[in-house]
Amino acid sequence: MRRRKIDPRFLGLLLLFLVAAATGIIYQFAAGRKDAVILDGYLGGEKIGFFEDPQVQEILRDSYQVEMDYSRAGSLDMVTLDSEGMDYLFPSSQTALEYYRELKGEPRKSEIILNTPIVLYTYQMVADALVEQGILQESDGVFYLDMEKMTELIKTDTSWAQIGLPELYGNVSIDTTHPAKSNSGNMFAGLLANTLNGGQTAEAEDLPGILPELKEIFGKLGYMETSSSDLFSQFLKMGVGAKPIIAGYESQLLEFSAENPEDFAAVRDDVVMIYPSPTVWSTHIYIALTENGEKAIEGLLDPQVQELAWEKHGFRTSVYQAAGSARFVVKGLAPEITRVMQMPDYETMRQIIDALQ
């Protein structure tokens, strides 16, 4: 049986057609990418994982035609940095927004995108000692710290050995980021101010009686990180001897467990998440500086993006109430945040920031 020869002219036409089709696809893809506006801004380190999530990026690019570029900065630091050419700021608190308004006026637009409470992270041996001292209590598998009792230990220079931890060097303390540069440290300072004020939200008129003690507490900490993500990373890497307790965001451990399951499995039984009683909410506010910067707000509030923010990165959005917390394997995760108090207002926090520079 003879094989039919294929006409070379036909092969040439076929090749030409395939090249043209491929060129068209590439052109359409490039055109689609071209439509996306690249936004530059300053971003808090605790949200880098969220911004670098391929699913989040795809939704923002394909549905809202924006791509988010960023430079990492502390929530308060970013307000004072040069914002020339920047489209947005994405700090972690209302205080940063008020600070911006004081220094630079009203932004084009601002919107709360994410929420997460301030928590403490420690290790099981420290948690056990605090339970023995009556400072830490467990309720339905969730650990709550009595802030008044803990603050008293710090104020009186109580050593770790005095609470049953001779393995640890020095006095009881809670490591935090710099309160004048980073939001988690700033919010912890506000929480301590409320505690020193008898459990009532501190006001400017209360500060003369609070600031000396607050400055003394922070003065004992020595060097403080300027990024909550750096502090959390150091906590995990350096262990209980270097950082027995740190202040941070609930979202950090939730994201770590979801995005790094193998690494989390190695520390799951030892790392303990503690909710200060009371705690405070960290509201992550997107601040648009330009017309282009405004374009990202709708995308960041997209239901799918908000769902990813909770399920992969641990930020509490409206989605978490429907999705629940069962998907996370983090022990001690509170299903609801109920023991909460208000942060001091901006004027009070500004005076606290100035005192702790």
Image (tube, rainbow, N blue to C red):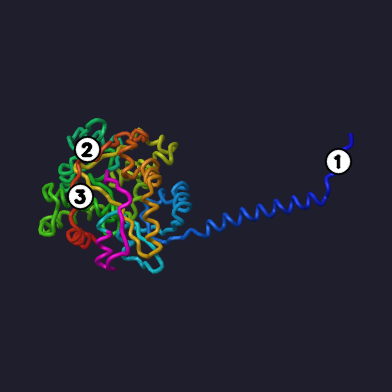
**Of pointers 1 and 3, the one earlier in the residue sequence:** 1
Place of residue 177 in the rendered image (x, y in percent of width and height, measured from the top left): 30, 53
Number of the front mark, 1 or 2: 1
Mark number, residue 43: none
Up-down: is 149 above or below 82?
above
Q: Secondary structure at mark 3?
A: helix
Kindly report the distance in space between the C-alpha atoms of the residues bearing marks 1 and 3. 85 Å
Identified by mark 2, the residue type is Tyr
- Give how far across and how far down residue 107 sits, in percent: 30, 64
- Kind of residue at badge 1: Arg
Give the number of the mark in front: 1 or 3: 1
What SS does tag 2 mark?
strand
- Is residue 171 shown to the viewer in this render? no
Left or right: 150 in relation to 65:
left
Q: CA distance from mark 1 to mark 2?
A: 82 Å
Q: Residue 92: image x %, image y %?
A: 30, 54
| Mark 3 closeness class: few <14, some 14–19, many ≥20 residues within 10 Å | many
Give the amino acid at mark 3. Leu
Report which residue position mark 3 lands on.
191
Look at the image and tell me in which quarter the N terminus lies.
Answer: top right
Q: Residues within 10 Å of mark 1 (few under 14, many from 20)?
A: few
Residues in magenta, as a range? 96-119
User: Image quadrant for the C terminus?
Assistant: bottom left
State the residue position of label 1: 4
Instruction: State the residue position of label 2.
Output: 144
Q: Is residue 255 magenta?
A: no
- Residue 296: name its quadrant: bottom left
Give the quarter of the image for residue 136.
top left
Magenta segment includes 118: yes
